[in-house]
Amino acid sequence: MDRCIVLVDAGYLLGAAATLLTGDATRSRLSVDHAGLIQQIRDRAQTETMQPLLRIYWFDGAPDRVPQPEHRRLRVMPRVTVRLGMLTRIDGRFQQKGVDAAMQAQLTELARHKACSDIVLITGDGDLLPGVMAAKEHGVAMHLWAVQAADGAYNQSEDLVAEADERHLLDRAWLTQAITAAEPRPLDVPTQLASQPSTPGEPSGAPQTSEPSRAPTPGDLARFTPSVALRWSSDSGWVDPDDGIPLLHTLTTPQQVWVDREQDLSVSGEPHEVGSTFAARWAARLPHDQAADLLARLDQAHPRIPRSLDAELLRYAARFGTIGNEVLDISNDHRVQLRAGFWSGVELVSRPQF
């Protein structure tokens, strides 16, 4: 069949892109336009192979193989099939399991059944070498795409590179059309906090005493640096009661659960947007006779979010693969953006309409 098929190892593609763009392989540091990325892959594959595209197979890992929001968005796109392996934590880091085996099996089956004339492979895994060799024996042309390495060296198996019929580079300019580094947010306590006078009326430039320095409390941060205080919302040291603030899941009907899942497909996964989406749902579903009182109490705690509600926000955010797979793997800068988005979402719903 004179057509091409693309096999994408998402762990390699996005991990290598994160390393190139941010210096860290953590995918949560990226902002990915998946629709744009798929279109780029499709256009380039057809141009380089000079064959029409049959399908793009997107291989990725997910906890318990449960599709994440990005996977649900991808699998409803035309000509895209998502295949999931396991995502497990090893030595404090997430690793894919079963993805290379699934790619190997798919590659071999496509070649054996002569489903295409050309296969584009986006991976760096040398374990796929036997599959590449077998595909070539069945008359399939193998095109290997490499993500530009951060240090200029290989980020692919040298044997895999040598075995490919055609080799092409996905450079920074191509990648950044759809993949960008997430905007960092300042997290360090400003120097003004360290130089605040210890007693009212004392000039800020007064010599520092020999009193031992202490770590800034959440109250310090809230008073002087509201944006930074957002990172303390669910800190274990904060023990104020939630004062009866209801959680989103208690306000959501079974019918709304399904609607929410469908709406989540259109959420980009950018932390601020995720936080805003969560907050808008929560605020809109508050009981009408209690909404004003609950929103007033919430506003009094600003910039803090009650612990239980904040934990629910983080669990919701962890469903988005672009942010993290578990609450503990959401970076501090993403937590700040999530909480800032939460307050934006609350303000949007509670603002008087004219």
Image (cartoon, rainbow, N blue to C red):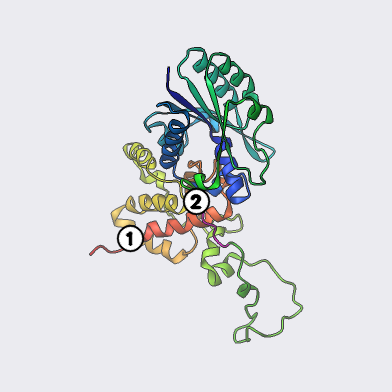
Q: Quadrant of the C terminus?
A: bottom left
Is 184 included in the stretch rendered in magenta? Answer: yes
Is 135 included in the stretch rendered in magenta? Answer: no
Q: Where in the figure is residue 203, as x and y percent of width and height?
A: 63, 86
Q: Which region of the structure is painted magenta?
A: 182-186
Towards the viewer: 71 or 199: 71
Towards the viewer: 347 or 83: 83
Does the image show residue 306? no
* Left-right relation of 166 to 155: left
Residue at image coords 67%, 46% = 151
Of labels 1 and 2, earlier in sequence is 2
Towards the viewer: 253 or 314: 314
User: In the structure shown, which secondary structural element does the residue marked by tag 1 occupy?
Assistant: helix
Q: Residues within 10 Å of mark 2 (few under 14, many from 20)?
A: some
Residue at image coords 61%, 58% = 237
Q: How crowded is mark 1: few (under 14 residues within 10 Å), some or many (20 or more)?
A: some
Total labels: the figure holds 2
User: In the structure shown, which secondary structural element does the residue marked by tag 2 occupy?
Assistant: helix
Tag 1 and tag 2, C-beta contact below 8 Å: no
Towards the viewer: 46 or 188: 46
In the image, residue 65 above or below residue 305 = above
For label 2, the residue is 308
Give, as a three-letter code, the residue at label 2.
Ser
Give, as a three-letter code, the residue at label 1.
Ser
Q: Which circle marks residue 350 in the picture?
A: 1
Does the image show residue 84? yes
